[in-house]
Amino acid sequence: MSALPSTSGKDHFAEAACYDVVVVGAGFAGMYMLHRLRGLGLKVRVYEQGGDVGGTWYWNRYPGARCDVESMQYSYSFSEELQREWDWSERYAPQAEILNYARHVAERFDLRKDIQLNTSVDCAGFDESAGEWQATTSDGKTVGAKFVVLATGCLSNARLPDIRGLSDFAGKVYHTGHWPHEAVDFTGQRVAVVGTGSSAIQSIPVIARQARHLYVFQRTPNFSIPAHNAALTAEEREAFRRIYPEVRRFAREEARNGIYAELPDRGALDDGDNARRARYEQRWARGGLTFMLAYNNLILDQAANDTAADFVRAKIAEIVKDPQTAKLLQPDNHPIGSKRICVDTDYYATFNRSNVTLVDIRTNGIEEILPNALRAGGKDYEIDALVLATGFDAMTGSVARIDIRGRGGRTLKGKWAEGPKTYLGLMSAGFPNLFIVTGPGSPSVLSNMIVSIEQHVDWIADCMVWMGQRGLDLVEATKGAEEGWVAHVNEVAHMTLYPQANSWYMGANIPGKPRIFMPYIGGVGVYRRICDDVAAKGYDGFAMTAAEPLREAARS
Ligand SMILES: Cc1cc2nc3c(=O)[nH]c(=O)nc-3n(C[C@H](O)[C@H](O)[C@H](O)COP(=O)(O)OP(=O)(O)OC[C@H]3O[C@@H](n4cnc5c(N)ncnc54)[C@H](O)[C@@H]3O)c2cc1C
């Protein structure tokens, strides 16, 4: 029995509205959204442009791709049974295993029957007279829906760099975010990797083991911490499962980044040199993203941050034998952690191999791509294959690609031209009944994203139930609440060192994109409490109305 009055069967919606909810995207967000809404008895259709579920893990098949939040935590928590029955094989599972997990979830919860693959949502327009959305898909169909949920992903719009001659390159070109499904073998080839972000840092050591020669074109070096990845034993998994209730509670309620970890009790400058070094050594030996939790002020205080950055720079100098290469690999233009920290396996050591060359393109970039070479610094590097690890139009790219029109036909892309504007990252004023999962203005990419996804999905589903129980049909962020939230997100960001980096959090990797710090830094626990409080106050900052007057007007 539905907790909500379904609109899909009503006469006055019969022509247009086929679904209660259209969900765009079938990654972890879209899949869980479908599961929750189906549990409410709603008629839901999910459209996914890819050939299978899994989102990020369907597209990013590059060599070495794996999660950087430990798998026991980078997994759904909504089902106790799922949590108990799925065995992760490694501390950081490889892409194929995470994709299998997504497929398993789709089967286990019988999601596939409501997911239409190989179909993108190209346009979505809000019909003000009917109070519903019309979505047009790449198969030429238009469907109606009371709600649209954008589960389009923060990192799903792969960015191709604008380099002269790219289309003339005679060899194979790969983007890490759009990797082919068949195995790619670089054996005997001269390969160029452009970019040194997370995907590059994961793939470079693997490609280097295959390629005849690997050229790495680096504009900005990034800080990377060793993963110390290893197989998980059955005993380790069971020990972890025993503490799962506390792990999940902590990740949701207390952690800033949605990860269960020991929280630091003091700042970096509270310790003397030896104690601080010992603590960083301990964190380095443990590996992974929680390196930044060595002290509680690393992302707040420049002097504190410098101590951690210096430690990692010293490690790079220790590992990389050639001093000039080591120097180039040492990040020096942003605080550690102000760009997403990378987690690697043998990244720095890979530059000790005789078949790997680091090419510095900080000053002049890549001048040109020739049919058989990359030209940089006036020199031609002959290559057979080109790997673009150039990242994504993050957080807004996939949303902006859809022609979304709200009240008065205003486009969301146009509204966001100066930077994304949302209330809580969940809705944008002027776009009623359009929800975004992990949108800009929410912790999203600064967190263990499955924790953030589950929180958003639950909040959205609860909001729909609340509306249904009160006979309300439309929900919309108010302009005032949105303005207040955008200002708050900005204010919190500027209390930290994050805005100092030219990062994709700021849109800095996309020429012409406004420099706005997009995710919410307040932390997932704090953010959850804010969202819960908003709901407890009757969805404070959201206007809710019944659509009947609209329908009446439409009928007459
Ligand atoms: C290489 C890589 C590693 C990562 N590792 C981690 C990690 O360790 N920990 C972590 O927390 N996060 C990580 N992330 C972030 C990751 O994106 C999220 O953890 C999570 O997978 C996002 O799920 P999602 O469903 O929100 O988005 P996605 O997985 O991106 O799924 C969105 C889906 O929407 C589809 N879509 C978009 N637009 C349309 C449209 N118009 N019509 C139809 N379909 C559409 C896309 O094809 C995509 O399949 C990583 C990201 C990358 C790229």
Image: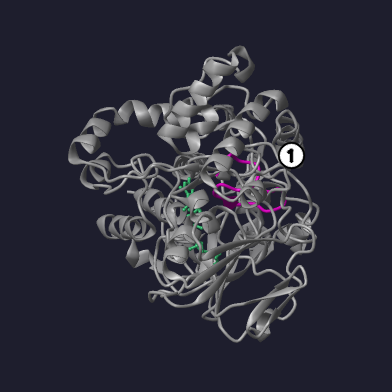
Whether residue 326 can be seen here:
yes
Q: How crowded is mark 1: few (under 14 residues within 10 Å), some or many (20 or more)?
A: many
Q: Residue at x 49, y 21 (%)?
A: 278
| Residue located 44% across and 31% down the image | 251
Q: Where is residue 141 in the image (x, y as percent from the top left)?
A: 53, 78
- Tag 1, which secondary structure? helix
Q: Give the range drawn in magenta.
A: 428-444
Report the number of discs.
1
In the rendered view, would you say 386 is above or below 199?
below
Q: Name the residue under label 1.
A: 499
Which image quarter: residue 407? bottom right
Q: Is residue 151 at all visible to an observer of this figure?
A: no
Viewer-side residue, 134 vs 98? 98
The one of 132 and 306 positioned closer to us in this rendering: 306
Q: In this view, does 435 lie to the left or right of 209?
A: right
Q: Name, please, the residue furthest toward the left.
A: 234
Q: Which residue is drawn at 76% across and 51% down?
A: 419
Query: Foreground: 299 or 276?
Result: 276
Report the amino acid beneath label 1: Pro
In the image, taking residue 531 as reference, residue 484 lies left or right, namely right
User: Which image quadrant: the C terminus?
Assistant: bottom right
Most common SS among magenta residues? loop
Measured as percent of width and height from the top left, residue 426 is found at 60, 45
